[in-house]
């Protein structure tokens, strides 16, 4: 089960990295239980996967916004960036010091994390804005529909007007034009 639906997932924080807005969360999970979550490409939720520098950028940008004592006292969530299947599996990661922006705890090849341990791993979702023309298409469709409805009501009221019947003026009434046929 992915942590996206987990009741233990933390609230999202929106950050901007390289011009893209991301919602960043964390959840206590293990690599072994959720291997699909660990990756940059879908269905993965870690755009920094396989890129320690990018993981560092995300961690620094997030800094202390998700709390101070998440991984261990004074550190935020863990940003996993690699995996080695050797032995029982090792996860390479880093954690940002929430009291000192220039300090990150390297959990790389020298001190990797066991893949079977549940830890507060960060994951992200890119915020993709709605393309600019989409609202215009919706407004144009609504305008066209309202105009058609107004024309249909106008044609019906002319055909049924008692004033026109009193003068002997007839207006052709087509059920197809009113959407009734």
Image (spheres, rainbow, N blue to C red):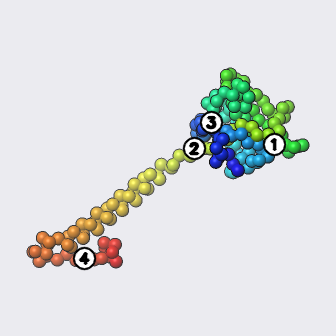
**Marked residue nearer the N-terminal end (1 or 3):** 3
Q: Decide which of tag 4 and tag 3 comes sooner along the chain.
A: 3
The residue carrying mark 1 is 116
Q: Looking at the image, do the residues carrying marks 2 and 1 touch, with CB atoms under 8 Å apart?
A: no
Q: CA distance from mark 2 to mark 1?
A: 30 Å
Task: Return the x and y of residue 59 as percentages of the image width and height.
Answer: 68, 32
Whole-angstrom CA distance, mark 4 to mark 2, is 52 Å
Task: Inspect this view and state whether residue 51 appears.
Answer: no
| Residue occupied by mark 4 | 173
Q: Looking at the rendered structure, which numbered label has been put on residue 127?
A: 2
Q: Quadrant of the C terminus?
A: bottom left
Disc 3 to disc 2, C-alpha distance = 11 Å
The outermost residue toward the right is: 87
Residue in the image at 35% along x and 58% along y: 143
Residue at image x 33%, y 60%? 146
Q: Is residue 156 visible?
A: yes
Vertical relation: 65 (above or below) 117: above
- Considering every residue shown, the one lying at the far top of the view is 100
Mark pair 4, 3: CA separation: 62 Å
């Amino acid at each position: 089960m992915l942590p996206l639906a987990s009741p233990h997932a933390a609230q999202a924080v929106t950050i901007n990295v390289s011009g893209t807005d991301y919602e960043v969360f964390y959840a206590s999970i293990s690599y072994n239980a959720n291997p699909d979550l660990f990756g940059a490409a879908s269905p993965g939720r870690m755009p920094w996967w396989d890129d320690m520098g990018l993981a560092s950028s995300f961690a620094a940008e997030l800094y202390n916004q998700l709390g101070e004592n998440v991984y261990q006292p004074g550190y935020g969530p863990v940003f996993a960036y690699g995996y080695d299947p050797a032995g029982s599996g090792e996860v390479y990661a880093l954690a940002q010091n929430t009291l000192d922006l220039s300090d990150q705890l390297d959990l790389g090849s020298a001190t990797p994390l066991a893949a079977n341990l549940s830890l507060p791993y960060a994951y992200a979702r890119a915020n993709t804005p709605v393309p600019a023309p989409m609202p215009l298409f919706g407004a144009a469709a609504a305008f066209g529909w309202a105009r058609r409805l107004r024309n249909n009501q106008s044609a019906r009221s002319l055909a049924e007007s008692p004033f026109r019947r009193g003068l002997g003026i007839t207006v052709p009434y087509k059920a197809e034009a009113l959407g009734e046929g």
